[in-house]
Image: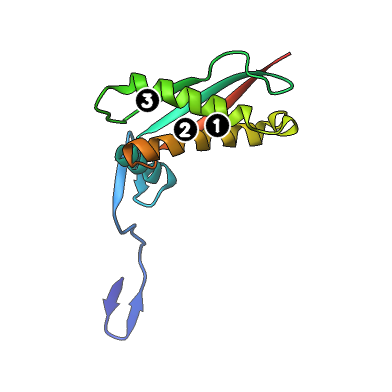
Amino acid sequence: MRLVPGSVEVVAEVRSGRCYVDGDVVVPANNDVIRMRRKLSFSGGGAVILVANQDGELLADPELILQGLATDDGLTSLAEEGARAVENAVDNLPRMARRDDVRMIEAARIALRRLIRERLGKRAVIEARIIRVD
């Protein structure tokens, strides 16, 4: 702003507020990427990979990737228990639901997230994917 007797004029705009430097990019603190990183740092995260046929039958045990989760006995038992929980959740879906990727993914994601919440008291960020095989 330029303030002179008799007039006020905007000469430039400047970004204000909290910002983060991410590599060579400056982003606002409320950016979705920054928000997700913050959540991951507090709650940890994981991924579930399912291999199923077109009818939704699992062709392999669910594969889990867990990161940023502290347990008393390491992540091995949590991963094994998580794989069983995911498998049970998928098996308990109605037959038609197992043919629907969205419903199958959501069942797997929620099963693992619920287990982590019960065991560790954390609301982990969980992603799930299905590989369909003919």
Q: Find numbered disc 2 in the image and state the secondary structure of the residue it sits on.
A: helix
Residue at (50, 32) in percent of width and height? 127
Earlier residue among tags 3 and 2: 3
Is residue 66 placed above or below 121 in the rendered structure?
A: above
- Depth check: 6 or 80 in front? 80
Colour scheme shown = rainbow
Categorize mark 1 by other alpha carbons within 10 Å: few (<14), some (14-19), many (20+): many
Residue 89: % across, % down:
57, 31
Residue type for callout 3: Leu
Q: Which residue is mark 2?
A: 112
Earlier residue among tags 3 and 1: 3
Residue type for callout 1: Ala
Residue 16: % across, % down:
31, 59
Q: Which residue is mark 1?
A: 108
Label 1–label 2 contact, CB within 8 A: yes
Q: Which residue is mark 3?
A: 78
Label 3–label 1 contact, CB within 8 A: no
Q: Find numbered disc 3 in the image and state the secondary structure of the residue it sits on.
A: helix
Q: CA distance from mark 1 to mark 2?
A: 6 Å
Categorize mark 3 by other alpha carbons within 10 Å: few (<14), some (14-19), many (20+): many
Is residue 48 placed above or below 35 in the rendered structure?
A: above
**Residue 120 appears left or right of 46:** left
- Kindly indicate the quadrant of the structure image that contains residue 79: top left
Is residue 66 placed above or below 126 in the rendered structure?
A: above
**Residue 102 appears left or right of 25:** right
- Kindly indicate the quadrant of the structure image that contains residue 114: top left
Residue at (35, 41) in percent of width and height? 122
